[in-house]
Each structure stands twice: as C-alpha cells, then as structure tokens.
C-alpha cells in the first residue's frame, strides 16, 4: 500500500500551511512584513536542507517532487516556514517568561510534529535517510537538528528584530540564519564525531519520543496568567495593527507610573513572535493540524500499525495546542 501522492503534499498541503501562516501573519504584522518574514523562513528552510545534504550526506529526496532546485523541494521549504512561525507563536501562548524558554518550547512542539512525520515519510518515499537511522529508520540526530534549527532562529529573530526598514530587517534575518546554520553544522559535526546514533540506538529513540510527547502535552495543558482585558490579546479598538505602544505607554508596553501591573499589555510589539501570538485566531494551530492530518492520512493508507500509533501519540500530545481561541497566555 502507498500513502497520498507526492503531488498532494507538494501542491496542496505545503501551500495550504504556508497560506494559513501568511494569513495569520498579515493580521499580526501587516501584509508586507508577514510575507517578508515567511519568505525569509522559507529561504532558511531551503538552505538548511541543502547544507545538511552537502555537509553530512544525510538524506535525499524522492523523485516524485516536481519543483526541487538543487534537490530540495520548494514545498519542503514552505512547510519549514509555516511550522517554525506557528511553533514560535504557540510557544508564546504558553506563558513562558524567557525568550530561551519560549524558543526551546517551540522547538519541542516542532519536534513532536516531526516525530509523526518522519517514519511515515520514509516509508512513502518522500525522502530517504542515508544511512537509515535506528529509530523506525530515522536518525535520532535529525530531531536534535530540529531543536537547533527552530530554537536558534527563534531566539535570534525575537531578540534582534526592530521592525525597521525592509533592507535592515533582511540583513538581520540573514545574520540570524547564518548563525543558526553554523550552529547546526557544529552540532552535527560533534554528533557524528561522538557516534551518538550508535550510542543511543533504537532504545534512545523511543525514550526521546516518549519524553518529547510528555513534555509537549504538559506545556500544551499549561496556561499562564490571563491578560487583563479578556482572552484575546491582539490589537484592540484604538490600538495599532502592529500592537505597538500607544500614547502614554512605554516603548516596551510596560506599566507607567500610576499604572497597575495587571494593566500592562502582554505583547506590545516588543518581540516578533509575541506579536504573532497575540493576534487572535487559530492560524498557528491550524498549520500544525493541516500538516499532521496529511501524514495521518498517509499512515492510514500505508497500513503500518507501528507508525500509525506513533502518529496518533504525537497528535494527542499536540492536541492541547490546537485550541481554537487565539490567545496569548501571559506577558513577554
């Protein structure tokens, strides 16, 4: 048995995920900034795939992809962009206080999704690991790479984003991407030199799978203190589209003299991902849902009970993140 045709993933699933992420981004950042951020993420996704294939000869894509410059499908880069943006927005909605914690939580959510994707994708021939890894044919180092990819970019873009001119913001994104890719290569070289795949083996893969699912479910069920003013913390009447500080507010949206702490807006344009989190709507969760549903359909069509149970476990762990209300749980 075989799963969905590659064309479904390339021309339906990937564009749908990207379009949902773009629509949500437009509401939070405006159309130009949203498109720029997602295109930067797509370029980052394409580059990390190409570098991993060139430096480590880690994997190759199947012949069914139609638009794949230098062997990397554009659809894969689109999914990278949508998933990274969605994961970082969802992490901000969990009420975590520090940028590092939010970035690591986003990486955890993305890894949990990929834990469902990978075993299905290789059985369907969407891509091939060279050589196959110990956990259902997938290298455990792949998931370590996801942590580096999502967390490093998320942390850099959050702490080095000013909302300035397009050229300066593009330069900042290029610098963040270059630093993140350098970190990916460095971690990959250390991982290979220490032969961590052999050290961890199949048992290590299953332990990592279980730990990731438990941590994701726990964070998904966690809701930080609700912001004053109701559930939705996106732009309100009289507030700018970008959620920036209004007259009488400080630059970071903090409380002013005579203003109670509870009135401080949770996300006031201080961070890029915070603005995406604060925009009302189910967009970030829908990105995960679209991608997960496509691969769940693949698992059902493949008829492999083990990968089906793996996909079900990841879906259940992610389910609390997919609540329809678009809220930010706490301050940034």
Image (spheres, grey):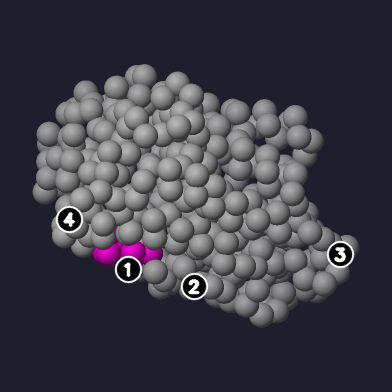
Q: Residue at x 47, y 68 (%)?
A: 322
The residue indicated by pointer 3 is 248
Which numbered marker is on residue 304?
A: 4
Q: Visible in this render: residue 274?
A: no
Counting residues from the N terminus, which is met first, the one under dot 4 or under dot 1? 4
* Label 1 residue SS: helix
Eye-nearest disc, 3 or 2? 2
The residue indicated by pointer 1 is 316
Name the image quarter holding the C terminus.
bottom right
| Distance between the alpha carbons at the discs numbered 3 and 2 | 34 Å
Eye-nearest disc, 4 or 2? 4
Range shown magenta: 310-318
Which residue is nearer to you in this view: 332 or 168? 168
Residue 107 in percent (x, y) is at: 41, 49
Q: In the rendered view, does 253 fall on the left or right side of 314?
A: right
Counting residues from the N terminus, which is met first, the one under dot 4 or under dot 2? 4
User: Which secondary structure type mostly characterizes the magenta part of the structure?
Assistant: helix
Task: Give above or below for 91 relative to 126.
Answer: below
| Distance between the alpha carbons at the discs numbered 4 and 1 | 18 Å
Which numbered marker is on residue 249?
A: none
Counting residues from the N terminus, which is met first, the one under dot 3 or under dot 4? 3
* Marks 3 and 4 close (CB-CB < 8 Å): no
| Distance between the alpha carbons at the discs numbered 1 and 3 | 44 Å
Counting residues from the N terminus, which is met first, the one under dot 1 or under dot 3? 3
């Amino acid at each position: 048995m075989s799963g969905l045709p590659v064309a479904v993933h390339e021309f339906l699933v990937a564009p749908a995920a990207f379009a949902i992420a773009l629509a949500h981004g437009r509401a939070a950042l405006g159309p130009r900034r949203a498109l720029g951020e997602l295109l930067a993420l797509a370029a980052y996704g394409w580059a990390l795939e190409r570098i991993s294939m060139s430096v480590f000869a880690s994997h190759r894509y199947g012949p069914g992809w139609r638009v794949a410059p230098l062997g990397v499908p554009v659809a894969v880069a689109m999914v990278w962009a949508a998933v990274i943006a969605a994961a970082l927005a969802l992490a901000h909605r969990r009420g975590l206080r520090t940028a590092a914690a939010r970035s690591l939580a986003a990486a955890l959510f993305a890894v949990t999704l990929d834990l469902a994707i990978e075993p299905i994708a290789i059985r369907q021939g969407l891509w091939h690991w060279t050589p196959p890894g110990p956990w259902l044919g997938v290298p455990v180092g792949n998931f370590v790479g996801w942590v580096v990819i999502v967390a490093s970019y998320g942390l850099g873009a959050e702490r080095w984003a000013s909302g300035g001119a397009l050229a300066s913001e593009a330069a900042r994104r290029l610098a963040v991407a270059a630093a993140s890719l350098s970190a990916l290569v460095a971690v990959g070289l250390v991982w290979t030199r220490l032969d961590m795949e052999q050290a961890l083996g199949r048992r290590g893969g299953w332990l990592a799978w279980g730990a990731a699912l438990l941590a994701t479910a726990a964070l998904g069920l966690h809701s930080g203190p609700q912001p004053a003013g109701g559930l939705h913390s996106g732009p309100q009447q009289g507030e700018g589209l970008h959620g920036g500080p209004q007259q009488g507010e400080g630059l970071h949206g903090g409380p002013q003299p005579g203003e109670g702490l509870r009135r401080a807006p949770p996300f006031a344009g201080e961070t890029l991902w915070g603005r995406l989190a604060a925009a009302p709507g189910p967009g970030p969760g829908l990105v995960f849902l679209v991608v997960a549903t496509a691969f769940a359909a693949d698992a059902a069509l493949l008829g492999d009970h083990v990968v089906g149970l793996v996909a079900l476990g990841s879906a259940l762990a992610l389910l609390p993140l997919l609540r329809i209300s678009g809220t930010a749980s706490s301050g940034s």
